[in-house]
Image (tube, rainbow, N blue to C red):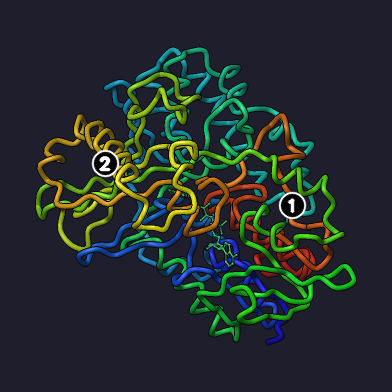
Amino acid sequence: MKHDVVIIGGGLGGLLCAYILAKSGRHVCVLEQNQAIGGCLQSFKRNNLTFDTGFHYIGGLEEGQSLHNLFRYFNLLHLPWQKLDTDCFDEIILQGKKYQFANGHERFVETLSQAFPHQKENLQQYSRKLQEIGSSLFDNFKGKAFDFYESPYFTQSAKEFLDTTIDDENLKCVLAGASLKMQLDEHLPLYIYAQINNSFIESAWRIKGGGMQIAESLVNDIRKMGGDVFCKQKVTQLVEENGVVKRAIVNHGEADFEADFFISDAHPARTNEWLEGSKSIRNIYRNRIKNAPNSFGIFTTHLQLKEGRIPYRNCNHYIYETNDLWHISESRNEGKSLLVNYQVPQTGEYTRNIDLLTPMSWEEVKQWEGTAIGQRGDDYQTLKKEKAALCIALAAKHIPGIEEAIEKVYTSTPLTYHDYTGTQCGAAYGIQKDHNRLLQTILPTQTPIKNLFQTGQNINLHGILGVSITALLSCAEITGMDWIKGEIGF
Ligand SMILES: Cc1cc2nc3c(=O)[nH]c(=O)nc-3n(C[C@H](O)[C@H](O)[C@H](O)COP(=O)(O)OP(=O)(O)OC[C@H]3O[C@@H](n4cnc5c(N)ncnc54)[C@H](O)[C@@H]3O)c2cc1C
């Protein structure tokens, strides 16, 4: 079967690329290994309730904000978005004390200044920097070349920025407190910290009915534009001839897909495996990817709750029982950090399901690598049960009645992600970007093979916003940057 472009992986990155390239008139094909499309956007249903596996909320969706133009272009604004409370979209609970993040930079500063009046000027400086970096988001598309490797926003760490801007240790923790959606450690570049936080301060949104709707909407539109989207098509090899990729072989030879261009949305280590023996990919490149660090994984406790017991809260809680937020993924912090996300109820004021998310390292589950889902043995079940109990106990300190309201518990670990999405080490946010090792950890969209490109969260930015920007950069390799600029209206 011949297409103009074959896209490997039907996560957000792959689907956005397919959407853009189908819109440019190219005949595209998405090959997804799983039964269902979406990657980290996948939701699952139990007893008529929808649970999200990865994505839980986004920022900057209002007109004029970071994600709005992109989601308008991708026809995603019609989905049932639910705006979180503007006076408190994230509540940071630090050792029992509560702090609110409000929308709009001015209100954000005002709200936190009430708790930290002596830090008002520093908070203003903090907010100005976030806005400055936020406004550079589309520089690459506006003729102001933005160099990931040279920009001071990338070479400075988030930690250094906080240390030099804020001189109250408690406030530093509060500001960093919504950071379970990135790996907060001393390696984290300021740019990533600032873009993500800035977009949520602009506005914050959940989706009623599950993140899967994003993937479904994209697939519908790709098909309407003549594109193909196939599930259960695991790419196992790329066939290279004369320095270009000719075909993608799926399921060890069951079928092959020919194209002029290929884009991989999978982890780059996987992409290299499909090209084993290729002379175009030198060892130095293979090693760069093999040695790139991966972010922590996430352990999720999905709670199915009895009806009418737990009031829906239109905000997230970030709960910490430690002040050491910069080493949160280390085992000594087990059971001490949690992101609590309420699923928007279909009707009424009570939620039927809540997700509790906490970092989990690959080392904790590595010994079960290679076992089949659902058949990993009793020790694995015990580990999950103990971990879920710690998460529920922490949530129960702040959500009265939650333990008694639980009807059923489902859990997932980094091994679940590893097996479902093929991500290296079950990393929640892909390759861990390091301000000191930008060349090793920020990958270009090009590969050493001229008709093979990369996209998705491993390349330069993660999250819905980051993956959307990267999709534009990946497609510009094929369409040219001017076409992309015209399409989005930059
Ligand atoms: C627990 C969790 C919570 C998160 N919460 C948020 C949030 O609230 N807000 C936010 O903005 N971001 C969040 N994120 C991050 C966000 O979901 C991801 O950055 C984004 O969805 C990644 O998209 P992707 O396309 O890069 O990768 P993926 O979603 O991993 O997609 C890659 C796809 O490639 C497929 N694939 C791999 N190998 C092959 C192969 N050999 N053949 C065919 N297909 C293959 C996989 O099956 C998968 O579908 C969260 C992530 C996690 C894990």
**In the image, residue 64 lies at what x, y percent?**
54, 54
**In the image, residue 301 lies at what x, y percent?**
30, 45
The residue at the point 69 percent across, 68 percent down is 237
Q: Residue furthest right?
A: 242
Q: Is residue 361 left or right of residue 281?
A: left
Q: Is residue 116 above or below residue 36?
A: above
The quadrant of the rendering that contains the C terminus is bottom right
Q: Quadrant of residue 9?
A: bottom right
Q: Is residue 412 above or below residue 328?
A: below
Type of residue at label 1? Asn
Q: Quadrant of residue 280?
A: bottom right
Q: Is residue 454 above or below residue 171?
A: below
Q: Is residue 155 left or right of residue 161?
A: right
Disc 2 designates what residue? 385
As measured in the structure, the alpha-carbon distance from the residue carrying label 1 to the one carrying label 2 is: 46 Å
Q: Residues within 10 Å of mark 2 (few under 14, many from 20)?
A: some
Disc 1 designates what residue? 140
Q: How many marks?
A: 2
The residue at the point 14 percent across, 35 percent down is 400
Type of residue at label 2? Lys
Label 1 element class: helix
Label 2 element class: helix
